Amino acid sequence: MASLYKNCPKCSAHSAGQDACPACGLIFAKYLKTKFALPAPARRAESEEEGEISFVARAKALVLHVPEEVEPMVFYGRAALLGAAALYGVKLALMDIPDWEMSASLMHLVLLPFHEFGHILFLPFGEFMTLLGGSIFQVLLPLILGGFFLVRNRDPFAAALMLWWGAAGILDTAPYIYDAWVPQHVLLTGRTGDTGAHDFIDTLGDLGLLHKAQPIGRGVHAFGIIVMVIALAWGAWLLWQQYRRK
């Protein structure tokens, strides 16, 4: 180390063959370490980047986790369940939006209690969020359950089915939004939106978007289909990996 310096880099005193400057006492090893160390912001950035990579790796491990051993009965049961979800999902996706065919479906009956509870749950957040709370909660609840299955049970297949349920909740909301521009469907109040309460007449009106209710409704419907396809593809990939290990 001493041979790097003939003269001290601090005071210029002759220091050839020395580990430290005989004049000012500068220790050359410590000086080099300090001089070439990464600045604090660079070290922080490097640490944050490593943290991000680690988080992505952990998330990927959770989302794509496949158990080492899969019972045949469990596998075939899951395959049948995913197939039923795919067939029913196609049926829901093809239901007419203006006629709100989905309001007569079994899925709508399942979602309705959660929708109404959502209004109560969001009461503390004001009128606007109370009105939106029903539609938010019927989508949010299965996503919360999916997160529980994913993190606590390490069961991404169950999480994929919960995502499918959330997508069905989005599809169920689309006709309700569409109806806000020209209300024609009888709601739980026994009246149509133009003579009674209608979540999206009020919320879209507050946002100045009521005149765009129909294209927004169709856009929400398309988004629901995309989410449902992602959920089914996720579940199918997991089953394929389980099949290879079966």
Image (spheres, rainbow, N blue to C red):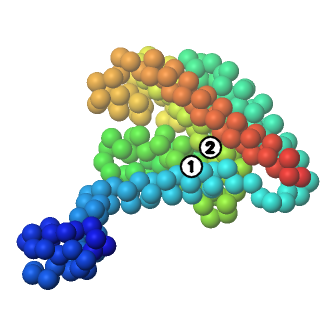
**Residue 228 position within the rendered picture, expressed as x and y whole percent measured from the top left:** 64, 34
**Residue 121 position within the rendered picture, expressed as x and y whole percent measured from the top left:** 44, 54
| Residue bearing the label numbered 2 | 163
Q: Is residue 78 left or right of residue 41?
A: right
Q: Is residue 27 left or right of residue 146?
A: left
**Residue 24, quarter of picture:** bottom left
> Which numbered marker is on residue 67?
none
| Residue bearing the label numbered 1 | 143
Give the SS element for disc 1.
helix
* Residue 88 vs residue 3, the one in the foreground: 3
**Residue 85 position within the rendered picture, expressed as x and y whole percent measured from the top left:** 75, 37
Amino acid type of the residue that numbered disc 2 sits on in the rendered structure: Leu
Above or below, 61 against 196 in this view is: below
**Residue 38 appearing in the image:** yes
Within 10 Å of disc 1 (Cα), the crowding (few <14, some 14-19, many 20+) is: many
Q: Quadrant of the N terminus?
A: bottom left
**Residue 192 appearing in the image:** no
Amino acid type of the residue that numbered disc 1 sits on in the rendered structure: Leu
* Residue 133 vs residue 23, the one in the foreground: 23
Q: Is residue 200 left or right of residue 142?
A: left
**Residue 213 position within the rendered picture, expressed as x and y whole percent measured from the top left:** 42, 21
Label 1 close to label 2 by CB (< 8 Å): yes
Q: Residue furthest right?
A: 72
The tag earlier along the polypeptide, 1 or 2, is: 1
Above or below, 216 against 110 in this view is: above
* Residue 201 vs residue 207, the one in the foreground: 207
Within 10 Å of disc 2 (Cα), the crowding (few <14, some 14-19, many 20+) is: many
Q: Residue at x 72, y 50 (%)?
A: 157
C-alpha gap between disc 1 and disc 2: 6 Å
Q: Residue at x 39, y 40 (%)?
A: 131
Q: Residue at x 22, y 68 (%)?
A: 5
